[in-house]
Image (cartoon, rainbow, N blue to C red):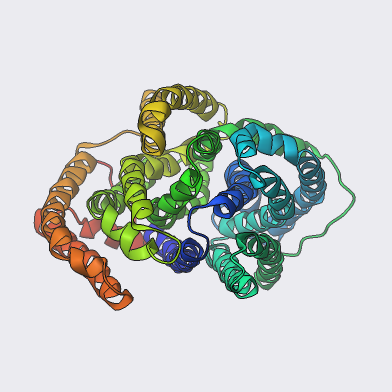
Amino acid sequence: MSLVRNVGTIGGLTLVSRIFGFARDMLLARVLGAGLAADAWQLAFTLPNTFRRLFAEGAFSVAFVPMYTRRLHAEGEEVVDGNQQAADQFAGDVLSVFIWVLLGFSALCMVAMPGIVWLLAREYQSVPGKFELSVVLSQVTFPYLMLVSLVAMLSGLLNARSHFAPGAIVPVLLNVVMIGGIVTGWYLRGDSGDDTIVAWALAISLALAGFAQLGYMWWATRRAGVHLKITRPRFTPEVKRLGMLILPATFGAGIYQISQLVDTFFATSLPQGSLSLLKYADRLNQMPLGIFGIALGTAILPMLARHIHAGDKAEAQRLQANAVEIAMLLCLPCAVALSICAEAFTAGIFQGGRMTAEDTAIMGQIVVALVCGLPAYVLVKVFQPAFFSREDTRTPVFVAAGALAVNVALNFYVVPRYGIVGLAAATAITATLNVLTLYTILQVRGWFHFTGKLAGRIARQLLATVVMAALLYWLVPLLEPYWRGDWMHRIWSLSALVGAGALVFFAAAFAFGALDKDLIAQLRRRRPANPA
């Protein structure tokens, strides 16, 4: 099984989703800008989306996938009928309980939504109608959590069987349906100027997208030969064990998501539009994180679980070293390029309609602060599976608790002084602290360590990144009249920045020996490497 192939499959399809996501946010920025309705919608979208990443794609997946994988491969690498039946029985038991838990949690949150919004955005009460709109939109969007959580479970089940494509495709459905919602809201608004119409259309489209995603994933699991039965909820020993693993994993796997809620709390205390600008800027940060970080974490977890279950420590070390090398090869140039080209990207992509030049200038500063933590965001996705595959969900809890405490303390200091940009920088700092602590623990326990070969490869990647940075520093001001021009000039000038940066980086990486051709060949041939 090739890590490169799996990451390529997930990353490629995620790239398609991110492109549609960019189209969605470009339309949203022009239609809503960064005003009252935009802030209310961003809060309503943040709540179910954060809980989805925290519980469904975070805690649930990292606990469910290793347990399901062990049942599926109980006798070795190959899946046999007995193992498949046992694994599907376990998944059916979990699904039968999971549905009722989601229903109860969603209903409770919808009833308590005024209090939840007050906790996160009490400052919205100072703007007439903003708090009330945020509450009702959040109540409309929150059922999406249940639908997308079931999607995440089915996706994790297919990932354990090395069917990564369906889970990477479903976000495309979300973005396509939401683009339809933006266009519908814009059409219904007409010349009235009532932005709440657009916000309502978006909220309804989110629920419709959840049904579309769940329908597709259910079809994909049936097509893969998985037959799940929903029965009377039974708390079997395996289901209880899963629940005990999920509780600490909720915190350990979701430091980034929990930080998003903390950031939302502080952002809503800043001038109107701050929350919207933060979310738009995070779209640029999420592009490489989603393509590389989530793809690596998704691909490595079931593979690592199998090596650890088989007692093959050398292969587990090799797999994680490969993942770190691939992660740095992809995210280092992205982080540097985004920081240099931040203003070009924010103005070229988002400016227009109700999104002003002043707004995109602030957004560019937020991007610079966020991407300083991009390597850390990605490496967390690589390091955490080393704990989760061993069913150690407690250690990341303590690490995440410390990082989150530092984040809150930093926000209290930087937000009054540096505003929304300081808030973004605090997120990057605490993410770096989180990943450094995780690596230290991995090394102390003997579960993973940096080798001389890996360190040398990353040093060469840094040299290639410096060469690329020099080119972009020269190109960005040279092309400024074009990425501030009409849409055709924006497209070709931003494409030129991306293309030139990528070409120079990979040429320099090849010249400096930052591309490990032997590693890629070994992964494709499924031949183990000898960790140096």
Farthest right residue?
232
Q: Quadrant location of residue 217? A: bottom right
Position of 276 compared to 241: left or right?
Answer: left
Query: Is residue 446 in view from this perspective?
Result: no
Quadrant showing the C terminus:
top left
Front-lying residue, 486 or 447: 486
Position of 37 compared to 200: left or right?
Answer: left
Front-lying residue, 486 or 410: 486
Residue 196 x %, y %? 64, 59
Residue 509 x %, y %? 15, 57
Position of 242 compared to 482: left or right?
Answer: right
Position of 242 compared to 445: left or right?
Answer: right
Residue 131 x %, y %? 66, 43
Front-lying residue, 154 or 127: 127
Front-lying residue, 432 or 198: 198
Q: What residue is at 31 percent from the left and 64 percent from the top? A: 348
Residue 15 x %, y %? 42, 65
Q: Quadrant location of residue 373? A: top left
Query: Is residue 187 in view from this perspective?
Result: yes
- Location of residue 520 with respect to 438 vertically, above or below: below
Picture mark count: 0
Quadrant showing the N terminus:
bottom left
Q: What residue is at 55 percent from the left and 31 percent from the top? A: 392
- Location of residue 94 with respect to 31 vertically, above or below: above
